[in-house]
Image: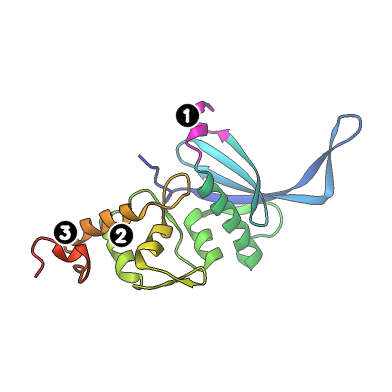
Amino acid sequence: MAPSYERWTVSGYVRPVMDQLPSGEWWPDRDRIERVAVISDPRGWLWEVVVDGERVEAITLRPIAGRRIDQRALKAAPLGYLSDAAVSFWKSVDAGLGDRGGAVNVTPVTEVMEAASGEVAQVFGKPPIEDFAREWAGTPKNPIVAGRQTTRREALRQRYRRPDGTPVSLATIDAWTREARALGLIERATTGRGNKTPGAK
């Protein structure tokens, strides 16, 4: 089952880049800094994500609450999500929404993603069908996404993501749409196969 990302939080700090001297010793270069986003995973992990602009430079996994790092934890790493959350966090800081130097206050991940993008944050895993119905109703039939016109189905697909950060399939969006229609939460289809729903006139 996909984890809920609603309780995940993100904070951040800057640190000097470490250079290795000819002697083999590591020494901080205080003229160059790294931006680190610390993402708290309630399952018992801390992810430290080093970003440079929109590029992820490194990801470190740290166990908390007595957890141990194992193969299962590494395979479950939501790389796309961690990347989006870390990049969005530092965009929010640059926009003046946090402390530019040193540690930054812990913030719900969804808030920084919304603030950075100006759009609704991505949702991971299957949403409550009532929430999906609201998103469906609030999405235009032909919305503009990333500067180009697309379909409602595609826009919703980009909003809902698997735990690894990749979009769900159009078939998944269609299945959730049928479920919401069957419950009377959204209008029946007027064209295509959807208008053959039992009870449709």
Color scheme of the displayed model: rainbow
Mark 2 Cα shell of 10 Å, populated few (<14), some (14-19), many (≥20):
many
Instruction: Find the distance from the CA under tag 2 to the CA under tag 1.
Output: 30 Å
Kind of element beneath mark 1: helix
Verify CB contact (< 8 Å) between mark 3 and mark 1: no
Please give the range of residues in magenta: 62-77
Q: Is residue 33 above or below residue 133?
A: above
For the residue pair 183 and 108, the one nearer the viewer reads as 183
Kind of element beneath mark 3: helix
Give x and y (percent) for residue 158.
43, 59
State left or right for residue 134 relative to residue 93.
left
Give x and y (percent) for residue 166.
46, 50
Q: Is residue 30 above or below residue 184?
A: above
Verify CB contact (< 8 Å) between mark 3 and mark 2: no
Quadrant in the picture for the N terminus: top left
Residue underneath mark 1 = 72
Residue underneath mark 2 = 132
Name the residue at 49% across, 54% down: 108
Mark 1 Cα shell of 10 Å, populated few (<14), some (14-19), many (≥20):
few
State left or right for residue 92 relative to residue 134.
right
Q: Residue furthest front?
A: 192
Q: Quick check: is 167 in the magenta stretch?
A: no
Instruction: Find the distance from the CA under tag 3 to the CA under tag 2.
Output: 13 Å
Amino acid type assigned to the residue bearing label 1 in the image: Arg
Residue 49, quarter of picture: top right
Give x and y (percent) for residue 187.
20, 69
Give x and y (percent) for residue 148.
49, 71
Residue underneath mark 3 = 182
Amino acid type assigned to the residue bearing label 2 in the image: Phe
